[in-house]
Image: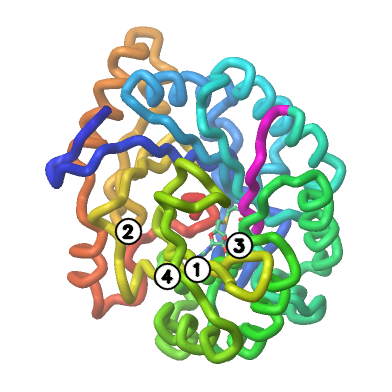
Amino acid sequence: MITDQYGRGVSYLRLSVTDRCNLRCFYCRSCKYLKFIPHQNILTYEEMFKIIQAGIELGIQKVRLTGGEPFVRRDFLYFLARLRHKFPFLDLRVTTNGTLITNKVLALKDMGINCINISLDTLKPEKFQEITGRDFYHQVRAGIDRCLEENIRVKINIVALKGVNDNELEDFVQFALTHPVDIRFIEFMPIGGRTMWNRDFYWPAKEIIRAVEKITPLEPVNFKTSKCSPGSTSGPARIFDLKEGQGRLGVISPLSDHFCDRCNRLRITPDGKLRACLFSDKEYRLLPLLRSPKLGPVQLKKVMERAGRKKPLGYNLLSREKNRQSVCQRVMSSIGG
Ligand code: SAM
């Protein structure tokens, strides 16, 4: 496995298969006139296979496919099935907005995808439309219900936005009390050149936990003894069992309590650029290596290994850039979260 200059092992690859999305969340892309990456610069599925193959040879054990919205890319389900077939031991995950999954849940289950991350920032249809620009709330809820019917674990990711969804905390907790889901609040991050981020939206994880404790008792999950997800770790999330209900609550706090010391990730953008840290604009271009007749898998692996070894500490970047609005120029929809 690649080990970086701070002793962190790199075992997790996040691959964004497209920068296109059928939602327009105001906090994510933030500017409706932003251009999409031209088709000819987008990685083909064959190129993604080569990157994943190289990653596995370098010690990658877990791959998450994300976007944009991964399910808007043509033949994405087929790509997933081929990946599963070629790499049966890979821990393969998907992050989606859930709008297009209802009729695909059985196929996902059949290929052994037993946990899906679904983003949903509100439980109110009208607010969903305000946040995302689209009237797709009921599709997402149907997707979540369908996953639960098929016993696929669902992690609901909520971007914590003061003044937007903080008044729904009780409803979200109620949802987790009555459904076997993880609800995870992610602190809003200042990502993308024209980010909407400002301090008024910022709802820190500690405040969220304190407010939840007033609603229902929490018990921190011990991942060594947890029956719910044996062998797993919490990743960047701090997870709590809801003592009086079925689900769990989590917080992901990149700003207030960073987890850079445990970061094990590399990210690949849809145009084949490797980012070794979410907050750093340093990108390693893999596309020319993949498309050059002279360079091949050996060179690809060399560059991926070098990027992994030089992974920066994102927290340093965040604190150095605190006077600026955003910490990186690329928008989240083309990084993948
Ligand atoms: N379309 C998929 C989805 O909705 O989950 C995958 C891509 S989306 C960019 C991945 C995650 O990033 C979503 O949970 C989204 O809410 C989150 N996200 C986007 N912009 C963010 C920001 N500025 N701060 C925190 N999370 C953000």
Position of residue 56 in the picture relative to residue 112 (left or right): left
| In the image, residue 177 above or below residue 170 | above
For disc 3, the neighbor class at 10 Å (few under 14, some 14 to 19, many from 20) is many
What residue did someone put label 3 on? 182
Circle number at residue 189: 4
Q: Between disc 3 and disc 4, whose residue precedes?
A: 3
Q: Does the beta carbon of the residue at mark 4 sit less than 8 Å from ligand 1?
A: yes
**Residue 279 numbered tag:** 2
SS at mark 4? loop
Residue span colored magenta: 111-118
Per the model, the C-alpha gap separating discs 1 and 2 is 27 Å
Question: In the rendered image, is residue 326 in sight?
Answer: yes
| C-alpha separation, residue under disc 2 versus residue under disc 3 | 26 Å
Please state if 39 lies on the left or on the right of 257 as rendered: right
Q: Which of marks 1 and 4 is nearer the N terminus?
A: 4
The circle drawn on residue 240 is 1
Residue at 61 percent of width and 43 percent of height: 94
Respond yes or no on whether mark 3 lies under 8 Å from ligand 1: no
Query: Mark 2 against mark 3, which lies toward the viewer?
Result: 3
Question: The residue under label 3 is which amino acid type?
Answer: Asp
Q: Which one is closest to the eye, mark 1 or mark 3?
A: 1
